Image (cartoon, rainbow, N blue to C red):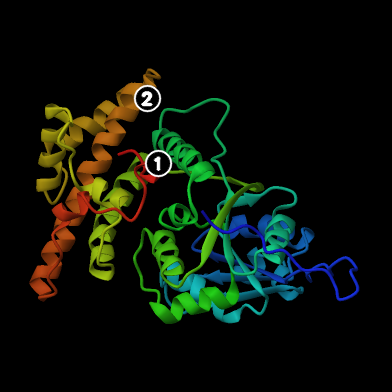
Amino acid sequence: MAPGPKRVPPGPHGEAPATPPAPTVTVVIPSYRRLERLPPLIRTYREQGADEIVVVLDGPHPGWAEALDGLADRAPVVVRELPVNRGLALARIAGLERATSDVVILADDDVAPKPGLVDHHRTFHAANPDHALLGYMPVRLPARRSRDQAATFLYARDYANQVEAWRTGSSADLLQSFWGGNASVPRERYLAAESFKPSVRLDYNEDLDLGLRLLAIGVHAAFDERAAAEHLHSRSLKAFLAECVVRGESVHEFELRWPVLPRQLAELVLIPDDHHPFVAAAQRRIAARDTPALLERTLVAGYHATGAVHAWRAQEAITRLLRRGLAMRGYRLRVARSAGAGTGHPDVSAASDASNASPEASAAV
């Protein structure tokens, strides 16, 4: 478990110890093609007393100044527009390089802070200056579910399961299942993690990569549900299917970068021994094809049919089947590209027995 807050000894004459000065806080918000979401976020963080707000536009965004409604011209807001899209991890580093505060809040542009979020992060770091903090950001689910929201409901359930693990997990468990979007790190420790192993473009699992780097340099972590926000997650089936392939590709990128593949990533591209034979066979068939074939198209049709009649459990079962099958495809294709380039790859089958994350922290697949 992470050590508790350090006690401040009394003064030389027995007087009460001085209260540690409150650290300054920079909110770093990378964003890609979501300009409409930024003005309310900027206003909220400013109203909550953030000392600095750094918005990183990840690539050219024509007309961004008008879209931000003049907010970029008002302190404490700084906007950096990158010349090309670099991906989340490198966009965050561009924000880190511009940040000047003691603490950096890693905020996503689809995570809406609740009242007091900045203060909770600030107060935590005043007592724990060398720790990272994971805040709480459950998915905002609609009151009435529509026919194409299985990906969002699946994500919400995975996050809720992760939170249950965090409530009782150790500091290492938290860092080995790190989620950004509503997390904070002392700026100097973030810079140290960057010196230890510089960020690269992963296109998925960037948060986990940061958590492992923080763990490697001796940072501890805690979880606080009072530092709360809402995740405005939204993913159509088409976007979800493309994302699944990217997730599989990222698993191989990750194993090239780290000596041991975290269990939750290995489980994404490995079929468990106790998996239902029909589901396992379907996932292998999907993974073996470079592009959608009859089975995949049939499952997609089944997804839409079950959504139309509100058969949510059946729809989510189809969604989970597609998730692993397409992730396995992405992994296979990325490994093949690496082999063609002569980079090689570790044996992912060994990763199922090695774990950088507790079983409870692994998302269901």
The amino acid type of the residue labelled 1 equals Ser
Residue 339 image point, x, y percent: 9, 69
Marks 2 and 1: in contact by CB < 8 Å?
Answer: no
The amino acid type of the residue labelled 2 equals Gly
Label 1 to label 2: alpha-carbon separation: 12 Å
Left or right for 153, reference 2? left
- The reply to whether residue 303 is in sight is yes
Residue 151 image point, x, y percent: 39, 38
Q: Which residue reaches farthest front?
A: 13
Q: How many numbered discs sit on the rendered protein?
A: 2
- The reply to whether residue 81 is in sight is no
Taking the spot 40% from the left edge, 33% from the top edge, the residue there is 150
Q: Is residue 279 above or below residue 24?
A: above
- Mark carried by residue 236: 1
Taking the spot 79% from the left edge, 59% from the top edge, the residue there is 47
Taking the spot 18% from the left edge, 38% from the top edge, the residue there is 272
- Mark carried by residue 184: none
To which residue does mark 2 refer?
A: 307
Left or right for 199, reference 54? left
Residue 314 image point, x, y percent: 31, 22
Q: Quadrant of residue 363?
A: top left
Question: In terms of sequence position, does the residue under pointer 1 or pointer 2 come before the other?
Answer: 1
Left or right for 200, reference 36? left
Q: Is residue 184 above or below residue 161?
A: below
Q: Mark 2: which secondary structure?
A: helix
Residue 246 image point, x, y percent: 29, 56
Category of crowding for the residue at label 2, using alpha-carbon neighbours closer than 10 angstroms: few (below 14), some (14–19), many (at least 20): many
